[in-house]
Image (tube, rainbow, N blue to C red):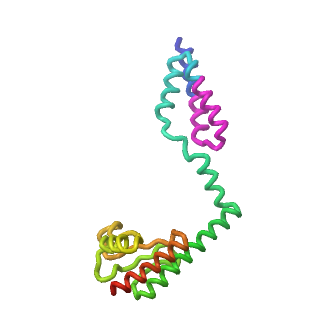
Amino acid sequence: MSSLLDKNVGFALEIYKQFTIISLFPVFPRQTAVLCRQRDRDFEHAESPDVRAVLQLDNRTTKTNGVSYIVQKGGAAVFTPEGQAQIRANIRIYKQNARILMQALDELGMWYTGGKNAPYIWLKCPDGMDSWSFFDFLLNEIQVIGTPGEGFGACGDGYFRLSSFGSTEDTKAAAERMIILLRKKNI
C-alpha cells in the first residue's frame, strides 16, 4: 500500500513540476492553453487523492502566469528597427513640445528647470501662489492642466510640473493660452 502511495505522489509531483514550469513562461499561448486543458483533464480523472491534492494546490496557489504574451511581444518589438524608429520619432515630438513650453516660459520671464533632456518642466508658481492654487487658476481660466508640486511632497509646494507628452498642436495651444493669461493678469 505504501509503495502505491509513493508512486502516486511521485506521479503527482512530476505532473505538478511539468505544468508549473510551462505555466510560468507562457511564451507559446496555444501550447499553454492545451497544457492547461490537459491539466484540468488530469485533475478530473485523477484517481488518487494525493494527485488531486497536488493539482488542487497548484490551482489555488497560481495567481499569475507571468507577463502576458502580448506584452512580451510588445516589449520585444521595441528592439526592432521599426520600433527604434518609432521611439526616436516620439522623442523628437516630446523634445519639440518641451521647446515650445520653454519658449513660452522664457517669454514670460518665469523661472523653470528641465525640458532640455527631460519630458518634464518644473516652474516656480507666479506671484507666490501655492501649487494647488496655480493648478486651479490654469484649469479654470484656460483649461490647461499640469501637476501641482505639492503632490510630490511638502517641498514641492510653490512649484508646478508641465509635461511634454501631449500632441504638438495641444502643446502650442496651451503655451499660447498661458502667455495670454499670465500677461493679462500681470503675473
As for residue 32 lying within the magenta part, the answer is yes
Q: Quadrant of the C terminus?
A: bottom left
At 49% from the left and 76% from the top, the residue drawn is 173
Q: Is residue 61 above or below residue 97?
A: above
Q: Is residue 11 above or below residue 175?
A: above
Farthest residue to the right: give it: 81
Q: Is residue 141 above or below residue 6?
A: below
Camera-side residue of 16 and 23: 23
Q: What x and y, as percent, mark residue 13?
A: 56, 27
At 52% from the left and 26% from the top, the residue drawn is 55
Left or right of residue 106, residue 86 in this image = right
Q: Quadrant of residue 8?
A: top right
Q: Quadrant of residue 105?
A: bottom left
Q: What x and y, as percent, mark residue 14?
A: 59, 28
Q: What x and y, as percent, mark residue 154?
A: 29, 70
Main SS of the magenta segment?
helix
Looking at the rendering, the stretch of residues picked out in magenta corresponds to 14-41
Camera-side residue of 172 and 20: 172
As for residue 50 lying within the magenta part, the answer is no
Q: What x and y, as percent, mark residue 64?
A: 51, 41
- Asked if residue 183 shows in the view, the reply is yes
- Asked if residue 10 shows in the view, the reply is no
At 54% from the left and 73% from the top, the residue drawn is 169
Farthest residue to the top: give it: 1
Q: Quadrant of residue 186?
A: bottom left
